[in-house]
Image (spheres, rainbow, N blue to C red):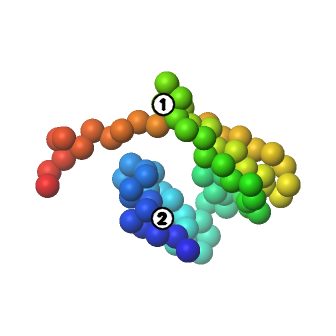
Amino acid sequence: MLNRALIDKYFVRELGDLIWKTAASDTGYNADPLYNAQDTDITDFIVEKADENNTVKVKFKNFGKNEVITFFVLKENTASKVK
């Protein structure tokens, strides 16, 4: 079950909106942007710690095939946001 609060916690608004819209759509985009796949059967999901360059590797199996996706983590500048 998808949780909007968790999406907003970990993704900037633009990407969070895309993930939420895709999940809520009957047609979606025919792919999952987090797993870079159209169909998923995810097992052995591991999120590694960020390295000194703020790179995070996510390892998993999709339908038994080993996959690795690299994310570049940035902290959003929230200081200028209107409260």
Q: Amino acid at mark 2?
A: Trp
Would residue 24 be found to the left or right of residue 62 on screen?
Answer: left
17 vs 36: above or below: below
**Quick one: quadrant of the C terminus?**
bottom left
**Quick one: quadrant of the N terminus?**
bottom right
Label 1 neighbourhood size at 10 Å, few (<14), some (14-19), many (20+)? few
Q: Quadrant of residue 8?
A: bottom left
30 vs 59: above or below: below
Q: Is residue 36 visible?
A: no
Q: Position of residue 35 (x, y in %)?
A: 66, 52
Q: Amino acid at mark 1?
A: Asn
> Quick one: SS at disc 2?
helix
Q: Between residues 33 and 65, which one lies in front from this camera angle?
A: 65
Q: Which residue is mark 2?
A: 20
What residue occupies the far left of the structure in this picture?
83
Q: Position of residue 45 (x, y in %)?
A: 69, 53
Q: Which residue is mark 1?
A: 54
Q: Is residue 30 visible?
A: yes
What residue occupies the far front of the structure in this picture?
49
Would residue 7 be found to the left or right of residue 76 on screen?
Answer: right
- Residue in view at x 60 percent, y 41 percent: 48
Would residue 78 be found to the left or right of residue 44 on screen?
Answer: left
Callout 1 touching callout 2 (CB < 8 Å): no
Would residue 36 be found to the left or right of residue 78 on screen?
Answer: right
What residue occupies the far right of the structure in this picture?
64
Mark 1 or mark 2, earlier in chain? 2
Q: Nearer the viewer, mark 1 or mark 2?
A: 1
Q: Between residues 51 and 66, which one lies in front from this camera angle?
A: 51
Label 2 neighbourhood size at 10 Å, few (<14), some (14-19), many (20+)? some
- Residue in view at x 41 percent, y 36 percent: 74
- Residue in view at x 24 percent, y 43 percent: 78
